[in-house]
C-alpha cells in the first residue's frame, strides 16, 4: 500500500501498518508530534490502533521548543 507523506512524497508500507508503527519507522515519538490524516487530527490515544489505508494523506508535525 502507498500513502502520501507530508504532501511531498509517497511511502510504501505493508498492509495493516498502524500509525504508531509508521512513527517508529520514521524515528519519531508520539509525544513529540501531531498527526493529521486526510486533514483530520488523530488523537494520540488512537495512534496504536489507527490502521493506515492505501491512498491516505498523512501529515506529521514535529513539536519544536524555543522562541
Image (cartoon, helix red, strand yellow):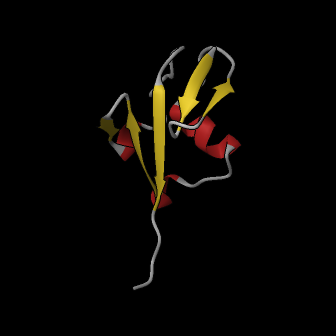
Residue 18 x, y percent position in the rendering: 55, 28
Q: Quadrant of residue 43?
A: top left
Q: Is residue 38 above or below residue 29?
A: above
Q: Is residue 50 above or below residue 34?
A: above
Frontmost residue, 58 versus 24: 58
Extreme residue in the front direction: 8
Left or right, 8 with reference to 26: left
Extreme residue in the bottom direction: 67
Q: Quadrant of residue 25?
A: top right
Residue 50 x, y percent position in the rendering: 44, 27
Q: Quadrant of the C terminus?
A: bottom left
Left or right, 15 with reference to 7: right
Frontmost residue, 24 versus 66: 66
Q: Residue at x 62, y 18 (%)?
A: 2
Extreme residue in the left direction: 40
Q: Is residue 47 visible?
A: yes
Q: Is residue 49 visible?
A: no
Q: Is residue 57 above or below residue 63?
A: above
Q: Residue at x 46, y 53 (%)?
A: 61
Q: Quadrant of residue 3?
A: top right
Q: Quadrant of the N terminus?
A: top right
**Number of residue marks:** 0
Residue 5 x, y percent position in the rendering: 56, 35
Q: Residue at x 51, y 16 (%)?
A: 55
Residue 21 x, y percent position in the rendering: 62, 35
Amino acid at each position: 500500500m502507498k500513502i502520501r507523506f507530508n504532501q511531498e512524497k509517497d511511502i510504501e508500507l505493508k498492509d495493516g501498518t498502524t500509525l504508531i508503527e509508521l512513527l517508529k519507522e520514521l524515528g519519531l515519538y508520539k509525544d513529540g508530534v501531531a498527526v493529521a490524516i486526510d486533514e483530520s487530527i488523530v488523537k494520540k490515544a488512537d495512534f496504536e490502533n489507527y490502521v493506515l489505508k492505501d491512498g491516505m494523506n498523512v501529515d506529521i508535525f514535529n513539536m519544536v521548543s524555543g522562541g
